[in-house]
């Protein structure tokens, strides 16, 4: 009898001397393959989305006869999740046993998208971030959301850019995914624009108008506080001379310090009423215009000529306009400065020209009429008594030449 499955020819021959059944006859004997059973299912190792079942290892498991397990469709690439997959048990003795089928549970993990985002090159403060920096890519479809957003202007320093990737196929890919890169933002440079200023005069001031390209406030310093002092953005002229005013901007978290910018100012003395008077007579030479000078040599110093409004370049016989007898009085008419801040006058009468001026009798002024912008004209009247009398005048000039 055969022991293996297969088809066998069975020949039967009857030996009969009568020869009626002398011919042998034959038929087939079929021994069918047995079908084994799977007694213990194997266990499949997990795979990741994108892999095929061939990447899953089947371990363990047993059949009713010796054999091995394999996935029925090893090229299948299942979706992420846990699903039942067909397996085939192939007996070692395929001659006598059929294959058997079953199923195992295969866990398919979600695949992690590969994000590529190189650290961007440094930028300078003031440059908005753009797609040049927000340049992450993924190996699968999806969208990126960035923080900070496109167009943001970041402070100087090392900033962290964040991209959140949301995969279009969230069922099979790990999503969302967060990636970061560092972006260095360098401080920006800045410059100062310091417009030139007109020269100043002592006692005056000017507004300093330097600006920085950064918009940050500019500060000022004076090279000589005896000539000019600084108060905020105002320069006060306090003395005659040259002075350098320097504008500075120290920078901040986002800007480098600016290079200083300096202007030079000439501070001139302010013209005094005495200057105006001297100028009106063309006395530009400082020696000629000095208060105690007497350019015309008439014996009257510039101080006196100024006080009484006479021409310092023309010899005057007297400092007064007129001296005449009016009735029983001796009337002296003279000019004087209108402003007491420029000159003061002391007019006294005395009977002896040698006595001290202060011991004379103060005289009251008569009617005063305007001569021009600077001078007025007035008079004193001395009664004629028969004895000698003198009119004596003393003027104190309170303004000095400034140059
Ligand atoms: Ca003179």
Image (cartoon, grey):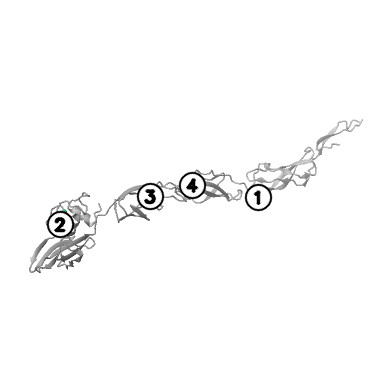
Q: Which mark is residue 185?
A: 4
- Could you tell me which quadrant the N terminus lies in? top right
Q: Which mark is residue 310?
A: 2
- Please state which of the two labelled residues, at mark 1 or mark 3, is closer to the viewer: 3
Q: Is residue 268 left or right of residue 146?
A: left
Q: Nearer the viewer, residue 235 or 395?
A: 395
Dot 4 or dot 3: first in sequence order is 4
Q: CA distance from mark 1 to mark 3?
A: 70 Å
Q: CA distance from mark 2 to mark 4?
A: 76 Å
- Please state which of the two labelled residues, at mark 4 or mark 3, is closer to the viewer: 3
Pointer 1: what residue? 81
- Does dot 1 land on a helix, a strand or a loop? strand
Q: CA distance from mark 4 to mark 3?
A: 27 Å
Whether residue 370 appears in this view of the structure is no
Pointer 3: what residue? 247
- Does dot 3 land on a helix, a strand or a loop? strand
Q: CA distance from mark 3 to mark 2?
A: 49 Å
Ligand 1 image position (quadrant): bottom left
Q: Is residue 356 above or below residue 125?
A: below
Q: CA distance from mark 1 to mark 2?
A: 117 Å
């Amino acid at each position: 009898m055969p022991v293996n499955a297969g088809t066998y020819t069975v020949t039967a021959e009857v030996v009969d001397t009568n020869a009626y059944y002398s011919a042998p006859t034959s038929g087939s004997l079929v021994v069918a393959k047995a079908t084994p059973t799977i007694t213990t299912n194997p266990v499949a190792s997990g795979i990741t989305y994108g892999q095929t079942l061939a990447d899953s290892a089947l371990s363990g498991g047993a059949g009713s006869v010796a054999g091995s397990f394999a996935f029925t469709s090893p090229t299948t690439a299942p979706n992420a999740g846990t699903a039942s997959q067909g397996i085939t048990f192939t007996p070692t003795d395929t001659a006598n046993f059929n294959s058997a089928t079953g199923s195992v549970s295969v866990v398919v993990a979600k695949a992690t998208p590969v994000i590529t985002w190189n650290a961007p090159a440094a930028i300078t403060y003031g440059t908005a971030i753009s797609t040049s920096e927000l340049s992450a890519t993924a190996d699968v479809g999806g969208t990126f959301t960035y923080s900070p957003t496109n167009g943001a202007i970041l402070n100087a320093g090392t900033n962290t850019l964040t991209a959140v990737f949301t995969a279009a196929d969230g069922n099979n890919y790990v999503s969302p995914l967060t990636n970061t890169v560092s972006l260095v933002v360098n401080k920006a440079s800045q410059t100062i624009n310091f417009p030139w200023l007109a020269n100043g005069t002592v006692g005056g001031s000017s507004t300093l108008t330097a600006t920085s390209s950064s918009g940050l406030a500019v500060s000022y310093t004076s090279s000589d506080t005896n000539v000019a002092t600084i108060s905020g953005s105002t320069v006060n002229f306090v003395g005659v001379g040259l002075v350098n005013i320097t504008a500075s901007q120290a920078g901040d978290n986002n800007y480098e310090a600016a290079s200083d910018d300096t202007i030079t100012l000439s501070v001139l003395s302010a013209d005094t009423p005495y200057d105006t008077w001297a100028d009106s007579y063309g006395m530009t030479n400082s020696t000629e215009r000095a208060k105690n000078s007497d350019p015309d040599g008439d014996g009257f110093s510039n101080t006196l000529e100024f006080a009484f409004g006479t021409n310092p370049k023309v010899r005057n016989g007297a400092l007064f306009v007129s001296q005449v007898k009016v009735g029983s009085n001796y009337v002296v008419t003279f000019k004087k400065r209108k402003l007491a801040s420029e000159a003061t006058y002391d007019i006294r009468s005395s009977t002896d020209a040698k006595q001290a001026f202060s011991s004379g009798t103060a005289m009251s002024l008569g009617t005063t009429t305007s001569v021009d912008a600077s001078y007025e004209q007035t008079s004193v009247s001395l009664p004629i008594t028969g004895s000698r009398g003198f009119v004596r005048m003393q003027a104190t000039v309170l303004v000095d030449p400034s140059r």
